């Protein structure tokens, strides 16, 4: 499902899963490890800025699974 969100829109983990395909479990584990997308904590709630998700996903791009080795 493709939805055009404003980059400043905040999404819950379930919304991130629905719109970007990242599982809630991955987001929880990566938050603890510090290697996932940036998050915003508001009290006990965790939210993700759409712009941060897009930037993080782009930063994970690799040219191939072989790492460029031929």
Image (cartoon, rainbow, N blue to C red):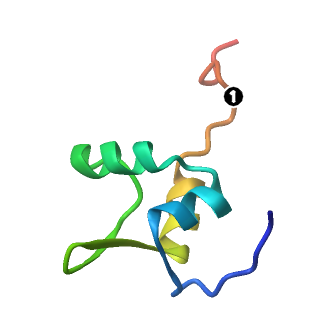
Residue 59, compared with residue 2, is above or below; it is above
Compared to residue 50, the image places residue 30 above or below, namely above
Q: Which residue lies furthest to the top in this view?
A: 70
Q: Is residue 42 left or right of residue 64?
A: left
Q: Residue 27 location, x and y as percent?
A: 40, 51
Work out which residue is located at the far left of the displayed protein and give it. Answer: 43
Quadrant location of the N terminus in the rendered image: bottom right
Q: How many labels does the image show?
A: 1
Above or below residue 42? Residue 64 is above
Residue 38: quadrant of the picture: bottom left
Q: Residue at x 34, y 68 (%)?
A: 39
Residue at screen point 53% across, 85% down: 9
Instruction: Give 61 or 26, whichever is nearer the viewer.
Output: 26
Residue marked by disc 1: 64
Q: Which residue is rendered at x = 59% and y = 24% of the image?
A: 67
Q: Would residue 14 be found to the left or right of residue 20 on screen? A: left
Vertical position of residue 34 compared to residue 52: above or below: above
x and y percent of residue 69 in the render? Answer: 63, 15
| Quarter that holds the C terminus | top right
> Is disc 1 placed on a helix, strand or loop?
loop
Mark 1: few/some/many CA within 10 Å (<14, 14-19, 20+): few
Provide residue 22's location: percent of width, then percent of height.
Answer: 55, 49
């Amino acid at each position: 499902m493709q939805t055009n969100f404003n980059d400043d829109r905040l999404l819950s983990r379930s919304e991130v899963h629905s719109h970007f395909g990242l599982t809630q479990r991955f987001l929880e584990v990566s938050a603890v490890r510090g290697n996932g997308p940036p998050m915003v904590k508001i009290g006990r709630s965790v939210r993700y800025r759409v712009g941060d998700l897009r930037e993080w996903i782009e930063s994970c791009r690799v040219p191939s699974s072989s790492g460029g080795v031929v």
